[in-house]
Image: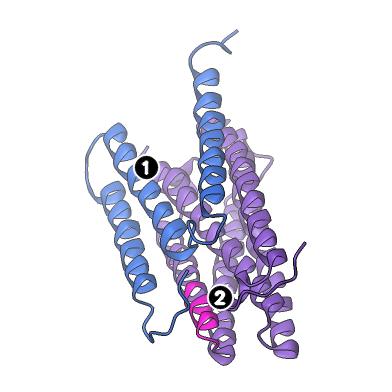
Chain colours: A purple, B blue
Amino acid sequence: MSSKIDYSLPLEYQTEQNRLNILGFWIFLGAEIVLFATLFGVYGVLYQRYAGGPTHQDIIMIKDVLIQTVLLLTSSFTMGIAIFEMRRQQLKGLIFWLVITLLLGAGFLFMEINEFIHYVHLGATMQTSAFLSSLFVLLGTHGAHVTFGIIWAIMVIIQLLRRGLTPTTARKTFIIGLYWHFLDVVWIFIFTFVYLKGMVG
Amino acid sequence: MEKHTNRFPISHVLGFIFSLILTFGAAYIALKTSLSFKVIMWIIGTLAVLQAGIQLFMFMHLREGEDGKTNVINIVYGVFMAVVIVVGSIWVMSAGHAAH
């Protein structure tokens, strides 16, 4: 494997190792698409099996869902700005936008946990019906990904503070950026096919 | 994959504005119109796919790098698998094959 550095490229693409790591992460994201597809598949099959328990309209707080959506959407945008700053070699700007992204992500997570508590208070738990089991597994898997992403990004920020912008730290930042955008893509489908669909039908 | 020398991230801002329009557009169509369930699902499903495309191309730079083509093939295959899994599961479980 060559360790030649190609200075004509952005930092994160400058070494062969970096390019391979980024390609590898895209392949991982392909597998993540399939993981979430299985959960969407289960939900799509079971979403009307209420077993006498609460239905979508009984539990969904659509205003809160819209706020969650805007928080995550905005955090995906600020993550994009962070990478933009990285390509301008602005370490301070990069870290600033990463922190904003994490605050928005934490806000999303806070609202989602509140939402789950609200559901449980209404008697809508994982054990209530097949609809709710599949709903909690789908939302919970996404929420767990967001939680993991926040911890991961904090560690990347610590490395950036200690080592500055190098091809290695730039690659790590770029990859957490891809991961974060991916979580927003999954949320778009949860928003559409869980919440909006639930409110319509 | 240009190194950004310009100061303003125009494609990100445009992508963000489009995403907001698509999100609130979908919410409006689903919550405030009285179209049939099927029509609404087709419209908001299409909007969701469009928005995912914005994320992939405008935010994630799907096509950049020497592996751009590999990335696209990989993601297209992932999406194909996703459609087979979701549509296939729902079809098999609701078309009467499992009714016994």
Q: Nearer the viewer, residue A100 or A4?
A: A4
What subunit carries mark 2?
A
Task: Determine the image quadrant of residue A197.
Answer: top left
Q: Is residue B35 visible?
A: yes
Task: Determine the image quadrant of residue B19.
Answer: bottom left
Residue A153 position, x and y percent, is: 67, 74
In the orientation shown, which residue stands out farthest toward the left? B34
- Within the magenta stretch, is there residue A85? yes
Task: Give the magenta range.
Answer: A80-89
In percent of the image, x 75 and y 89: which residue is there? A162
- Within the magenta stretch, is there residue A183? no
Q: Is residue A136 visible?
A: no
Picture layout, residue B97 above or below residue B14: above
Look at the magenta stretch and give its main secondary structure. Answer: helix
As helix, strand or loop, the secondary structure at mark 2 comes to loop
Residue tagged 1: B45
Residue A150 position, x and y percent, is: 66, 71
As helix, strand or loop, the secondary structure at mark 1 comes to helix
Type of residue at label 1?
A: Gly
In the orientation shown, which residue stands out farthest toward the top? B100
Q: Residues within 10 Å of mark 1 (few under 14, many from 20)?
A: some
In percent of the image, x 73 and y 84: which residue is there? A158
Residue tagged 2: A10
Q: Are marks 1 and 2 in contact (CB under 8 Å)?
A: no
**Residue A128 placement, left or right of A155:** left
Determine which of the numbered discs, if any, sits on residue A90 in the image: none
Q: Nearer the viewer, residue A91 or B72?
A: B72
Type of residue at label 2?
A: Pro
Task: Determine the image quadrant of residue A6.
Answer: bottom right
